[in-house]
Image (cartoon, rainbow, N blue to C red):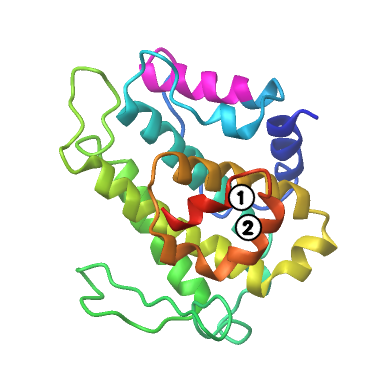
Amino acid sequence: MNIAVSFSSFFEKGKTFRPKKKFSPGTLKYSLHKQAQASLNSGVNLQEAIKLPPGEDFNDWLAVHVVDFFNRINLIYGTVCEQCTDTTCPRMSGGPKYEYLWQDGDKYKKPTHLPANKYISLLMDWIESQINDESIFPVTTDVQFPKNFASVCKKILTRLYRVFVHVYVHHFDRLMSIGAEPHVNTCYKHFYYFVMEFSLLNSKELEPLKEMTLRICCDFHVSNYNK
């Protein structure tokens, strides 16, 4: 099965929550992006597709995947956003045990309770500002990545994972009703394998979806949860 094509063709029919971030043709990151997509298109096992290509810089590989996950998770949330309102989702949560508070150090200086749709909108704006900042995500090889680039990406990926948590826990019925479950599962597995391969998420963040993850990523070593 052509994973990337089937995913893209499905979500092209849906709503886009945010405009896609694209790489400029001719740049190294564009080439890496195409290389990553080609691996997915070839039907390669996802665990192999996320491995750092020989001779490539990890920061470039990380940047490409962070942008790709941002685009894909935007599309996923776009399929459920009409059902995610102040009334249906008054808190950004992943079930009764997990709630995520918003803090950006600017308008929200302290952790703040927000409806899920407001939290996710602020989150996507925040990530978009990060990836559009060329001092953080340089587009040419003559500009160096900042020293804290990996930690910036870890924070972005941690917050993006929370969108997965909310969508799976609170909007799974919607995913099922529109036939999106297998496509979202593929995106989730891609994300999960990537962050586990490079130790980019704290194991505590994975707890809300632990049982589901063990089920759909059963071909991955369970022991990785305890890293």
Examine the rendered structure and indicate whether residue 69 appears above or below residue 17.
above
| Amino acid carrying mark 2 in the image | Thr
Residue at image x 46%, y 73%?
118
Residue 161 percent across, percent down from the top left: 49, 58
Residue 137 percent across, percent down from the top left: 28, 35
**Residue annotated with mark 2:** 213
Examine the rendered structure and indicate whether residue 141 appears above or below residue 112.
above
**Magenta-drawn stretch contains 30:** yes
Q: Earlier in the sequence, mark 2 or mark 1?
A: 1
Instruction: Please report contact status of discs 2 and 1: CB closer than 8 Å, yes or no.
Output: yes
Point out the stretch of residues depicted in magenta. 25-39
Residue 138 percent across, percent down from the top left: 26, 30
Residue at image x 69%, y 70%?
171
With 222 as the anchor, is 149 left or right in this view?
left
**Residue annotated with mark 1:** 188
* Dominant SS in magenta: helix
The answer to which of 132 and 37 lies nearer the viewer is 37
Query: Mark 1 packing: few (<14 Cα in 10 Å), some, or many (20+)?
Result: many
With 5 as the anchor, is 121 left or right in this view?
left
Query: Mark 2 packing: few (<14 Cα in 10 Å), some, or many (20+)?
Result: some
Residue 154 percent across, percent down from the top left: 34, 50
| Amino acid carrying mark 1 in the image | Tyr
Q: Quadrant of residue 159?
A: bottom left
Residue at image x 61%, y 44%?
220
With 38 as the anchor, is 225 left or right in this view?
left
